[in-house]
Image (cartoon, rainbow, N blue to C red):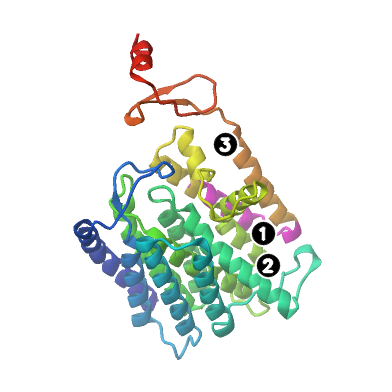
Amino acid sequence: MEIILLATILAFVITFTAIPVIINVSEIKKLYDLPNARKIHAMPVPSLGGLGIFAGFIISCLMTISFSSAPGFQYYFAAALVIFFLGLKDDILILTPMKKIIGQIIAAFIIIYKGGIVIKSMHGFLGVNELPEVISLTLTYLTVIVIINSFNLIDGVDGLAAGLGIFTTLTFGVYFYVAAHAEYAALAFAMCGSLLAFLIFNRSPARIFMGDTGSLLIGLINAILVVQFINIADSPGATVPLHASPAIAIALLIIPLFDTLRVFSIRIFNRRSPFSPDRNHIHHILLDRGMTHKAVSFTLIVVNIFFVAVAYFLSFLSINILIPLLITLAFAGFALVYLRKPRLMVVANGNTEDILQLTKPKPSRIMPLTPAKKAAERN
């Protein structure tokens, strides 16, 4: 328990101390995330918050986790370092999607081949248990890459990625602590502590963004935790057995995973790169429905908690029933949001300060007005 508390406190204090310094340096060096037609924020905002998250997380882990009792952890930190430099370069210079994927594959290679993060079984899903090595490795690579990108892509609203990251790492941390896996608990709580400190500065209106440096790191750590959670919770000698662990793991990551896979599918269907930017994410849709940043983040986090509660309390069901049930609920929930009539947004001369919200039952659109039309509209 001592190392867990120490990991959480150290991570929180280091990140909380580092973020104001990073904000000041970003302002001096003009290292901003600039607004554009696709982005939501209207003013330049520092985007190197991931530096503070990484500093708090990695220093806390190195001071509390012993490599002798957890030999694979040195490779987790090596992969985290790869992801850190990958995200940092993208935040400053902008990388192509291909270069980002290559960096993520390198990080995945480290934790899979050296760290032992491997999905070896389907745990009875679709009647499949043990997997052949080739399929096992392919599935693990796919899972790690998707989870890393899911947190990167969900980071579009103030407090959302950090809030979801706090929830997932806190949940994993509590389980690993109860299941007597203190090192993994410390890993999860260190990330949770860093994100708690960062969220103080990332609440709407955000003073700083985490950038790819932070979101990719959250995805990597969650990928490690989720694979270990599934393997440990459903193992024969588990201290706290959870036979529906794959379903609970999906429920824990349902918001970022579902949104990422849905958006990727839409882009591929439209013959576009799955990494091409757009405004089809669930947080964009909720914002277009008139919700604020705080409301969007709070709603999606609560929905995520709801899915975990459903998976946990229905864990007595077969995962062949529970996983399709969770997916069906996710589609049904999204359909309710998508089919709700949005409000018309009229922008005068492209100035967001002149936005008028009308309640006409028409699709949402942006209409730039000429001076003559603007005068006629006022009359």
Q: Is mark 1 on a helix, strand or loop?
A: loop
Relative side of 199 to 168, left or right: left
Query: Do the numbered discs 3 and 2 sit on residues whose CB atoms are within 8 Å?
Result: no
Tag of residue 337: 3
Tell me the amino acid under the disc marked 1: Ser
Residue at the limit of the structure toward the top, as seen here: 379
Which of the 4 quarters of the picture holds residue 88?
bottom left
**Residue 240, image x, y percentages:** 59, 72
Tell me the amino acid under the disc marked 3: Val
Report which residue position mark 2 lands on.
Answer: 243
Above or below: residue 359 compared with residue 253? above
Frontmost of labels 1 and 3 is: 3
Q: Which residue is drawn at 40% across and 71% down?
A: 84
Q: What element carries label 2?
A: loop
Report crowding for label 3: few under 14, some 14 to 19, many 20 or more residues within 10 A (C-alpha). some
Relative side of 279 to 196, left or right: right
Mark positioned earlier in the residue sequence (2 or 1): 2
Residue 318, visible in the rendered structure: no
State the CA–CA distance, disc 3 to disc 2.
Answer: 32 Å
**Residue 11, image x, y percentages:** 33, 70
Residue at the limit of the structure toward the right, as seen here: 127
Query: Do the numbered discs 1 and 3 sit on residues whose CB atoms are within 8 Å?
Result: no
**Residue 295, image x, y percentages:** 42, 40
Which of the 4 quarters of the picture holds residue 78?
bottom left
Report which residue position mark 1 lands on.
Answer: 315
Query: Do the numbered discs 2 and 1 sit on residues whose CB atoms are within 8 Å?
Result: yes
From the image, give the main secondary structure of the stretch colored magenta: helix
Mark positioned earlier in the residue sequence (3 or 2): 2
Above or below: residue 188 compared with residue 64? above
Q: Residue at x 49, y 28 (%)?
A: 365
Tell me the amino acid under the disc marked 2: His
User: Quick one: 180 or 78, which is closer to the camera?
Assistant: 78
